Amino acid sequence: MAREFLLPDIGEGLTEAEIVRWLVPEGGRVEADQPVVEVETDKAVVEIPSPYAGTVLRHGGTEGETIRVGSVLVVIGEEGEAEVSTADVLEPEPTHAAPPIVGSLNEEAEVLSPVGTTEPDETPTAVKALPIVRKLARDMGVDLGQVKGSGPEGRITREDVLAAGPPSMGTQAPVDEPPPHAPTAGAPPPGAGEGERRPLSRLRRTIAANMAKSWAEIPHVTTFDEVDATRLVEIKSALSARHEVKLPMEALVIKAVMPALEAFPEFNATLDGDDLIVHGTYHIGIAVDTPDGLLVAVIRDAGSRAVLDIASEVRRLGEGARERSLAPDELSGQTFTVSNIGAVGGGQGTPIVPYGTTAILSVGRAQEKVVVDNGDLAIAPVMPLSLSYDHRVIDGAQGRRFMALVIENLEEPALFLAG
């Protein structure tokens, strides 16, 4: 009997996915548990196996097409068999996993009825929009019931909301009367030329939405400092030579941060309404620069790991993030984040606190500078540090104390390596 296999929620609050590549063509034979298709979610490219054996009678979409969870992914039966009716659909079994680090898209029901009254003989039209689009509409004061969607099946997109909103948030100009000489919404400014319109990738859209959410809802404070990295660089070189591996700087920084997280648990916490959830384990996120955009991979229970074990995880997770092959639980659930912008030549900056956490430490590239050593001038590798934290939870004095302990550890690695 031919059966339809619906796109399942693969455990990260998925609402839709883009088909990257079909691994079995229409008419091809597939075995049970054999991967049949690659799909791209908000953060990862994953293979989805077939739940049963048979012949692929029909693909539920073409490569590059986006389909929703619960839509037909593939129809499998016997060669020459007619397709199944919807009454014979095999429902995917639900899966459960931690929410993704950049947030999920299924916070509310997908379809809304527009706000407002209707005549008794009128039937309100359903409004289709993703939760992040509905939130944007609420923030901008846009009535989704008055917006015509340009997305698939009439779905309202972010661009539709922006086009329907005021030209600039916080201005007094009316929506339908832009200020004199102002460009029309969505149009290039005068003299800019036609340019090129590039649609954002799924990953970039997710990054943009969640960066905006973090920046809008978390009152950030960033404190800057520098550390004499002479001993840190020496230890890194010695360990790399002894164990014949390239020791990532993140491994030493994570170990140096651990005593500070233990001393100041508010930095390893989540603010939930009026409650602060202080986590009992240390899941450290590491920012990874990938060709598709920034991803944060997570080292689980980093507090119990030795420095070489952490180094191995940094390398493994970094490679997996760049290949987009990590599992959802390897890209979610961090309690504190370390960003090594020094790896790409960066110095100090203002890192954005990932939503659901309270702090992030950015480490820049160590460069030789003149320093004072016991009253004498000397040349030393100086590493810039930037610590951003949630000011609702952490005060400035506490932020400085946390940073001071991290600096102390980085300047003398024996303090944390002995633990």
Image (cartoon, rainbow, N blue to C red):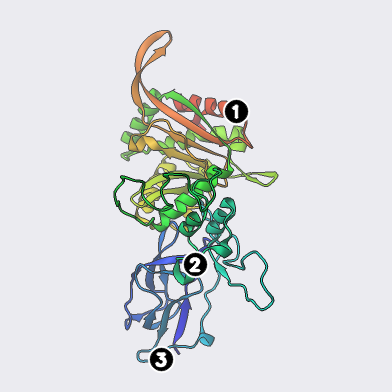
Tell me residue 157's x, y (percent): 48, 61
The amino acid marked with disc number 2 is Arg
The secondary structure type at the circle numbered 1 is helix
Label 3 Cα crowd, 10 Å radius (few <14 / some 14-19 / many 20+): few
Whether residues under marks 1 and 2 lie with C-beta atoms below 8 angstroms apart, the answer is no
Along the horizontal axis of the image, is 216 left or right of 373? right
Whether residues under marks 3 and 1 lie with C-beta atoms below 8 angstroms apart, the answer is no
Q: CA distance from mark 3 to mark 1?
A: 68 Å
Taking the spot 39% from the left edge, 74% from the top edge, the residue there is: 61
Q: Mark 1 = which residue? A: 396
Taking the spot 49% from the left edge, 42% from the top edge, the residue there is: 305
Reply above or below: 217 against 253. Answer: below
The secondary structure type at the circle numbered 2 is loop
Q: Mark 2 = which residue? A: 155
Tell me residue 311's x, y (percent): 40, 42
The amino acid marked with disc number 3 is Ala
Give the mark nearest the N terminus, 2 or 3: 3
Judge depth for marks 2 and 3 and give the one in front: 2
Tell me residue 291's x, y (percent): 33, 50
**Residue 82 shows which numbered tag?**
3
